[in-house]
Amino acid sequence: MNIIEEKILDRKFTKLIWKSLRAGHFEFATYQNNIIGTPQGSIISPILANIFMNQLDIFMEQLKRDFDRGKESRESSESNRYHYLMTKAKRNGEMETLKRLAKEKRKIP
């Protein structure tokens, strides 16, 4: 209820939600008191789902931010090797070798 009361400031409405959560239901002419969740088709079910899904979204966004490192992935050692060879070929004026290495580097996954 603390999460619900943070999002919904109307105390009368939160009391109504609390009462409907504690209320039971009739099933096959017997009274059932279910303490887990809301009955299917209840009017407050979508409201509570939106509130709790928002909390899940916030948690997952924070988890993603904690997991992310940097903006770009590191280059592979194979890519670094091609970069070194291309720089060396460019410095020595070997344009054909440079073109060949550039084509090969583009094929690296």
Image (cartoon, rainbow, N blue to C red):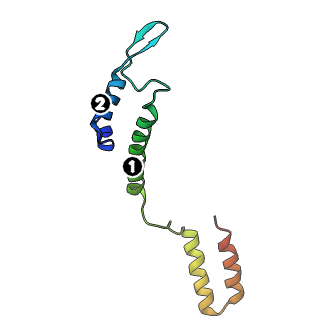
For residue 62, above or below residue 91: above
Q: Check disc 2: other Cα within 10 Å, few if <14, some if 14-19, many if 20+.
A: few
Q: Nearer the viewer, residue 35 or 107?
A: 35
Q: Which tag, 1 or 2, sits closer to the chain's start?
A: 2
For the point 41% across and 43% down, which residue is it? 56
Please state the total of marks drawn on the protein image.
2
Q: Nearer the viewer, residue 73 or 82?
A: 73
Q: Is residue 19 left or right of residue 27?
A: left
Q: Check disc 1: other Cα within 10 Å, few if <14, some if 14-19, many if 20+.
A: few
Where in the figure is residue 49, as x and y percent of width and height? 44, 36
For the point 39% across and 51% down, which residue is it? 63
Q: CA distance from mark 1 to mark 2?
A: 25 Å
For the point 39% across and 18% down, which residue is it? 34
Q: Amino acid at mark 2?
A: Lys
Q: Amino acid at mark 1?
A: Ile
Q: Nearer the viewer, residue 61 or 52?
A: 52
Q: Looking at the figure, which quarter contains the N terminus? A: top left
Secondary structure category for the residue under label 2: helix
Label annotation for residue 58: 1
Where in the figure is residue 24, as x and y percent of width and height? 38, 17
Q: Is residue 98 left or right of residue 83?
A: right
For residue 63, above or below residue 24: below
Where in the figure is residue 85, as x and y percent of width and height? 60, 81
Q: Looking at the figure, which quarter contains the C terminus? A: bottom right
Residue to which mark 2 is pinned: 15
Question: Which image quarter: residue 54?
Answer: top left
